[in-house]
Amino acid sequence: MEIPASFVEKARFVGVIFTDVEKEYDALLRMLTLGMDWTWRRRMMSKIRFARGMRILDLACGTGLVTYALARLIGPEGLVIGLDPSMSMMGAAIRKKGSTRESPWIEFIRATGEFMPFRDGIFQYETIGLALRNFGDKSGMFTEAHRTLSNSGWFLSVDFVLPDKSLIRRLYVFHIFNVLPAIGQLVSANWRRTLLYLARSIQLSTPSVEICRMLSRQGFRRTFSEKITLGVVTLVGGHK
């Protein structure tokens, strides 16, 4: 599977990839990661110092898994905004809000992280859960994140990467290119396509060292990266 390199083409491509998979997304993701996806998200959220009235932006929010978790921690005096370009994924996130009637301090906006419709310095934190690979222009998104974060704000992302160790890498590549798409085919052809994209996007993922360099070039300081679960996932962050 070839993934477009340009921002516009990749944005369209990712939009197609995540169409018609939203209904099974939460349950299948948990099954395919053996429940570890929440371990990774909680690791990212543990870096947040929650305070009354704070504002958080959840980029590439998908079905709102991180968005709702943040809202439950922040409380009714704060605000959490989920942003995503996919109409189908965001529709699933909005339906959760309508069905549960919880967390009225959540809002969802359809937009890309490379062009955010927000004024400068409005958020204390910006997060990305398992989706940094999906951005066609990471530098542009980091520039926008820096612009929309308040002074002393933090950008945080946790995402899949290729492990450094050779044996683990070979086993992991076999798993994501062969086992996961086969499981996806049992659900639907769309899920097989989406999981093939997942495998290819992980194979092409930007190393965490380079992500930290990109953050630094866009003005972030105190950048860091942490490897998780045998190095198949990395948490990265930067401070404005």
Image: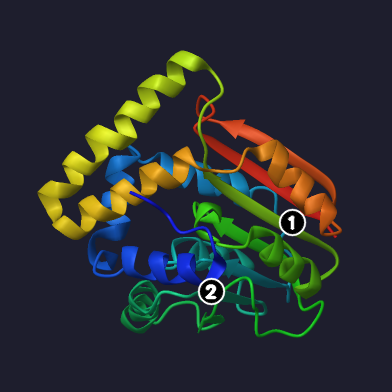
Which secondary structure, mark 2?
strand
Q: Which residue is mark 2?
A: 82
Q: Which residue is mark 1?
A: 49
Looking at the image, residue 158 sits to the left or right of residue 149; the answer is left
Residue ID at (67%, 77%): 78
Q: Please, which residue is most extreme toward the top here?
A: 167
Q: Nearer the viewer, mark 1 or mark 2?
A: 2
Quarter occupied by the C terminus: bottom right
- In the rendered image, residue 177, in percent from the top left (x then y), is placed at 30, 36
Above-or-below relation of 223 to 80: above
**Dot 1 amino acid type:** Arg
Colour logic: rainbow
Residue ID at (38%, 27%): 172
Tell me if I can see residue 202 in this picture: yes
Above-or-below relation of 10 to 239: below
Residue ID at (39%, 70%): 15
Q: Residues within 10 Å of mark 2 (few under 14, many from 20)?
A: many
